[in-house]
Image (tube, grey):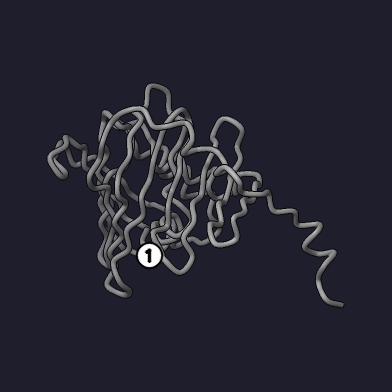
Amino acid sequence: MRKLAVRISCLILVLSAAACAQDFSADLVSTYKQGKPHTSKIYVGNNKMRVETGEEERTGAAIIDFTNNTELVVMNQQHMYMQMPLHQMAESAFTFWRPDPTDACPQWQKMAATFKNAKEHIVSCRKVGNDIVNGRPAIKYEGTSSDGKTGNAWIDPKLRDVIKWQGSDGGMELQNIHEGSQPASLFEPPAGYRKFDASQSLAHRPQ
């Protein structure tokens, strides 16, 4: 489960287009025993999500459009953006992030089975019960992967989102959650940025 969570957090915090899901912004804080804590900023609204890396040396953002299954990568240093189909793993992983709050195990197990690495398969999953995370009501789950590692996930019923994940090697959680509609401009290419053209890039590559 740790490898699965690391992959997802490195890609983006993938959120699904669940009906009646609450729009919000939050800090995504990832902490692992190996490596420094990392914080990203996320915005969710109108079936879209924006994730900002917060890394000064390569500041940028990823914008996911779940309606059209596209991903837009903003590159601030180059004043460019690149648009592509939503990554296959992202399509599978968003089920993990917005499951049914009252019965999440079947969705997680189905999603885990789509990955080739057998260590990522969830062999057992159970609902622990109600809990509180950073002052918000949550439903706690416990899962065990086929390599024997265990982890816990907390779902916020109102957001329909996993707001905390914890395993033996670390975890991640959403902090400073602010509910409410988000500006449409957050989910569009910045004004003045040009679209990256891969064909032109290849044409100008030195022979």
In the rendering, at what x and y percent does residue 133 appear?
16, 44
Residue at 45% x, 69% y is 57
Q: Is residue 43 above or below residue 41?
A: above
Left or right of residue 152, residue 23 in this image: right
Quarter in which the C terminus is drawn: bottom right
Left or right of residue 69, residue 143 in this image: left
Left or right of residue 50, residue 35 in this image: left
- Which image quarter: residue 119? bottom left
Q: Is residue 141 above or below residue 33?
A: above
- Which image quarter: residue 100? top left
- Identify the residue position indicated by label 1 in the image: 147
Q: Element type at marker 1?
A: loop
Residue at 43% x, 48% y is 51
Q: Of residues 205 and 168, which is closer to you in this image?
A: 205
Q: Amino acid at mark 1?
A: Asp
Q: How many marks?
A: 1
In the rendering, at what x and y percent does residue 204 appear?
82, 67
